[in-house]
Image (cartoon, rainbow, N blue to C red):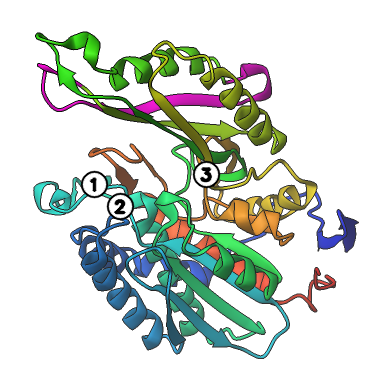
């Protein structure tokens, strides 16, 4: 059964009793719980912040070796301006569906974090920097592909795995690659972390950054303060007046998160910088924010200061879509085989799935390990989510690899 939505043919999921699980596949997924935790520990104990080239190389080498052992051909592709290379792994089968799995190797944590806060587990939760975002996603992807290989499943045309090195800073070094690979596949499964309520993400806000730079003139703060031009004072003025750029009714937020200025208390600062995090639901809000910020920034408190302001756009929004909803219902039916229920959520966070969606390719997000505390030192993964998430991803790959058997026209 099929229907056309937004020009794409997708599976229509009908209501009814949950199907029985694939007992063999489930047993294999449960058997991989301990090995998956061991692999996760190995990855978590390597610092791989976006700017840690060595750590990203080390994580990439481990992941590439695992995928190569599963029969994948490995490519290492530049990710300028990122410091390390993206990994693209491909495996051809005998079916029709072309499936892309996307995860990222970089974290928000700096060098030394893994040593100070190494992997630990209390049996119910495992902790460590980047454990759910997104090293857990890498592990779920590898283990789902492993159990399918053990079953001899090859009813797909191609499965590709993309491991990105710079998602946490906007995927600027990987955007073109993500778009190209997405358009060469029929569906994309993003292995970002599962939500704490055991959910998937069906829509996301777009993201960007405002960068403010103020230049002034230094002088002695006690002897000749009026001879200086206080860049920090002007920056503070700008932050206050620009703090109203958001629009709650439209889901737009603008939050100033970083400010720097001056080096000594007895010197009028000659420069200051600030950054704001921008999130939008509606793409046109980027244009509105950019227009308004320039108009507002022209109103200076310190006339002789030089103010420069720019909006850097990162991820586009991933709005609600009937196509995404249909794929989510297919995932929900699979999870119901285990007697489990997926929550379907929207997120203020941004991810590579937004780039996929903008490229016009069906995608679903949040298929990685379930956890919480994202981007904090208390980030954790739910140990008991490992087997169900391996099963869910493996069954999705089975289902969407068999386009012909589902009587689903390949989306283009």
Q: From the viewer's side, name the closer residue of 14 and 304.
A: 304
Q: From the viewer's side, name the closer residue of 347 and 372.
A: 347
| Left or right: where 102 falls relative to 85 | right
Q: What's the residue at 79%, 71% (across, down)? A: 406
Q: Which mark is residue 127?
A: 1
Where is 313 relative to 192, above or below?
above
Report crowding for label 3: few under 14, some 14 to 19, many 20 or more residues within 10 A (C-alpha).
many
Task: Check disc 2 and report the residue beneath it.
Answer: 131
Q: What's the residue at 51%, 25% (across, down)? A: 254
Q: Are marks 3 and 1 in contact (CB under 8 Å)?
A: no
Task: Check disc 3 and report the residue beneath it.
Answer: 350
Can residue 395 be seen here? The reply is no
Q: Are marks 1 and 2 in contact (CB under 8 Å)?
A: yes
Report crowding for label 1: few under 14, some 14 to 19, many 20 or more residues within 10 A (C-alpha).
many
Task: Locate residue 55, reporting x and y percent.
Answer: 23, 65
Sequence-first tag of 3 and 1: 1
Q: From the viewer's side, name the closer residue of 318 and 271.
A: 271
Residue 60 lies in the magenta stretch: no
Report crowding for label 2: few under 14, some 14 to 19, many 20 or more residues within 10 A (C-alpha).
many
- Distance CA(mark 1)–CA(mark 2): 7 Å
> Which image quadrant is residue 258 in?
top left
Task: Locate residue 2, reporting x and y percent.
Answer: 88, 62
- Name the secondary structure under disc 2: helix
Where is 278 relative to 220, above or below?
below
| Left or right: where 244 falls relative to 5 | left
Q: Give the magenta-colored segment's residue range.
A: 246-268
Task: Locate residue 250, reporting x and y percent.
Answer: 68, 23
- Distance CA(mark 3)–CA(mark 2): 18 Å
| Left or right: where 130 falls relative to 219 | right
Q: Which mark is residue 219?
A: none
- Name the secondary structure under disc 1: strand
């Amino acid at each position: 059964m099929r229907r056309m939505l937004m020009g794409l043919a997708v599976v229509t999921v009908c209501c009814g009793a949950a199907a029985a699980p694939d007992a063999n596949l489930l047993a294999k997924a449960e058997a991989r719980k301990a090995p998956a935790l061991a692999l996760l520990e190995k990855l978590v104990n390597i610092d791989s912040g976006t700017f840690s080239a060595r750590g990203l190389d080390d994580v990439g080498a481990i992941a590439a070796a695992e995928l190569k052992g599963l029969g994948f051909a490995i490519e290492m592709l530049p990710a300028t301006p990122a410091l390390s290379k993206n990994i693209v792994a491909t495996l051809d089968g005998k079916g029709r569906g072309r499936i892309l799995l996307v995860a990222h190797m970089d974290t928000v944590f700096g060098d030394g974090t893994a040593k100070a806060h190494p992997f630990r587990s209390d049996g119910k939760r495992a902790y460590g920097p980047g454990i759910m975002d997104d090293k857990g996603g890498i592990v779920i992807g590898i283990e789902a592909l492993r159990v399918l290989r053990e079953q001899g499943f090859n009813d797909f045309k191609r499965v590709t795995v993309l491991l990105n090195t710079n998602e946490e800073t906007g995927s600027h070094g990987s955007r073109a690659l993500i778009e190209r690979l997405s358009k060469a596949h029929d569906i994309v499964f993003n292995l970002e972390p599962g939500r704490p309520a055991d959910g998937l993400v069906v829509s996301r806000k777009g993201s960007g950054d405002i960068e403010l730079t103020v230049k002034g003139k230094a002088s002695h703060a006690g002897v000749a303060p009026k001879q200086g031009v206080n860049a920090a004072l002007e920056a503070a003025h700008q932050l206050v007046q620009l703090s109203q750029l958001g629009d709650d009714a439209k889901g737009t937020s603008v939050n100033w998160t970083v400010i720097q200025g001056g080096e000594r208390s007895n010197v009028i600062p000659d420069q200051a910088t600030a950054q704001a995090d921008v999130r939008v639901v509606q793409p046109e809000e980027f244009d509105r924010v950019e227009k308004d910020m320039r108009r507002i920034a022209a109103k200076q408190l310190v006339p002789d200061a030089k103010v420069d302001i720019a909006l850097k756009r990162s991820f586009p929004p991933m709005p609600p879509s009937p196509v995404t909803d249909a794929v989510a219902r297919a995932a929900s039916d699979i999870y119901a085989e285990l007697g489990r229920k997926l929550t379907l959520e929207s997120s203020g966070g941004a991810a590579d799935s937004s780039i996929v969606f903008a490229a016009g390719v069906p995608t679903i997000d949040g298929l990685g390990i379930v956890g919480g505390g994202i981007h904090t030192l208390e980030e954790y993964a739910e140990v008991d989510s490992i087997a169900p998430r391996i099963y869910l991803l493996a069954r999705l790959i089975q289902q969407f690899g068999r386009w012909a058997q589902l009587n689903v026209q390949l989306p283009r």
